[in-house]
Image (cartoon, grey):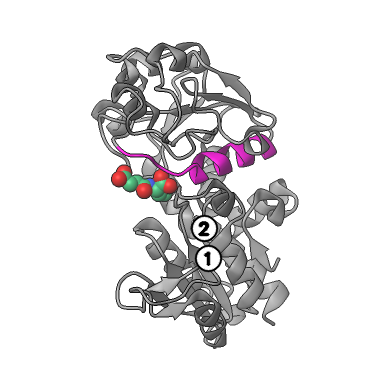
């Protein structure tokens, strides 16, 4: 494996899951693979779990790690070609990337969707330039369209906690004051389907994800119906994907009478979204929804806004898996970096 950005890069997911459990049991047994090798972790966005777990994973494998926050101390980077660089950006990505490649054996990149251009985001404008110009193996630490290290950790966690062969896994949209990327829900849906689970995705009208990522899942607009009999509930906020509201928080567009939406498009009506002004917060996951599940485990990638996404009692409850998911981030990262070291760096 040279690049990691999709579930397909893992090949057979069942084989990858078995390997991950092996890595978890023997995480310091592969140090010879990374000796005198450097893992460079480039962050264009904030991070807590990804930064710590990926650094730990590379160190478990005997690698040196260098972490760079592009927005804290590096030169501001221009990312578009043909721009006259007379503004505040001193360096171009087209020089910065090959320079980074000189110092690294493997590069991890975090670069969220910017919601300025759907085309740039869905073509992975930043990640694909690292793949093209660094000359080194590259893995995603959440880029515009996916967060495959998170989804791999989530599936490992489900495998460890499921009590039926084919659990019902429900991914639900939940409210947020801002507008979050589709990367986490895209990858989670894709991995959960690939793992062979019964996958239901529930969200208000207007929040449909890119169907390339939800293929194989059932879309159910009635959240209570979706939750019936669920074994696992995965909550996440995401902004609209469909045009013309790509990257928007639709509740805000609707409540503002369309004034915060794209110019020239009609105001959204809340009933069109299956929402009424007072009730979009009813999508916050609480004991009401959890009561109709099969005593489901609760999951979220973190960071989570309590009492927006999920109530205190559910996230603190005995069925919450948010901490085991975070712990498995070390394992998903180690499995991925191990595979890259084995195939590309020996
Ligand atoms: C990111 C996201 O993609 O949703 C990272 C999740 C792993 N989350 C946020 O940016 C949360 C920010 C907030 O203000 O809640």
Does the CB distance between marks 2 and 1 fall below 8 Å?
Answer: yes
Instruction: Decide if residue 209 is on the left or right side of residue 281.
Output: right
Q: Secondary structure at mark 2?
A: helix
Name the residue located 38 percent from the left edge and 16 percent from the top edge. 270
Measured as percent of width and height from the top left, residue 341 is found at 64, 74
Name the residue located 45 percent from the left edge and 47 percent from the top edge. 115
Q: Main secondary structure of the magenta part?
A: helix
104 drawn magenta? no
Q: Is mark 2 within 8 Å of ligand 1?
A: no
User: Which residue is denoted by mark 1 in the rendering?
Assistant: 27
Say which of marks 2 and 1 sits in front. Answer: 2
Can residue 285 be seen here? no
Measured as percent of width and height from the top left, residue 11 is found at 74, 53
Name the residue located 54 percent from the left edge and 38 percent from the top edge. 158
User: Which residue is denoted by mark 2 in the rendering?
Assistant: 331
Can residue 306 be seen here? yes
Instruction: Decide if residue 337 is on the left or right side of residue 310.
Output: right
């Amino acid at each position: 494996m040279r690049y990691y950005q999709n579930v397909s890069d893992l090949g057979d997911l069942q084989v990858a899951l078995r390997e991950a459990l092996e890595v978890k049991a023997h995480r310091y047994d592969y140090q010879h693979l990374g000796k005198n090798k450097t893992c460079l972790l480039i962050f264009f966005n904030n991070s807590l779990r990804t930064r710590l777990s990926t650094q730990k994973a590379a160190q478990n494998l005997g690698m040196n790690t260098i972490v760079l926050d592009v927005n804290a101390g590096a030169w501001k980077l221009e990312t578009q070609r043909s721009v006259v660089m007379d503004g505040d950006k001193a360096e171009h990505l087209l020089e910065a990337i090959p320079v980074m490649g000189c110092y690294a054996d493997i590069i991890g990149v975090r670069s969220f969707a910017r919601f300025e251009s759907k085309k740039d985001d869905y073509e992975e404008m930043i990640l694909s330039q690292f793949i093209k110009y660094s000359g080194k193996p590259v893995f995603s630490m959440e880029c515009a369209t996916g967060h495959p290290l998170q989804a791999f950790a989530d599936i490992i966690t489900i495998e460890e906690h499921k009590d039926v062969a084919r659990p019902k896994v429900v991914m639900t949209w939940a409210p947020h004051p801002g507008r979050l990327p589709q990367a986490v829900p895209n990858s989670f849906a894709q991995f959960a389907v690939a793992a062979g689970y019964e996958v239901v995705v529930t969200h208000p009208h207007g929040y449909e994800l890119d169907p390339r990522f939800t293929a194989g899942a059932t879309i159910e607009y009635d959240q209570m119906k979706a939750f019936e009999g669920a074994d696992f509930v995965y909550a996440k906020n995401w902004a609209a994907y469909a045009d013309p509201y790509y990257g928007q928080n639709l509740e805000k567009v609707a409540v503002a009478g369309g004034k915060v939406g794209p110019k020239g498009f009609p105001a959204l009506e809340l009933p069109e979204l299956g929402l009424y002004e007072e009730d979009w917060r009813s999508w916050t996951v609480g004991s009401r929804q959890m009561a109709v599940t099969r005593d489901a485990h609760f999951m979220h990638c973190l960071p989570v806004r309590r009492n927006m996404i999920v109530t205190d009692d559910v996230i603190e409850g005995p069925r919450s898996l948010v901490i085991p998911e975070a712990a498995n981030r070390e394992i998903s990262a180690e499995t991925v970096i191990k595979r890259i070291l084995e195939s590309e760096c020996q």
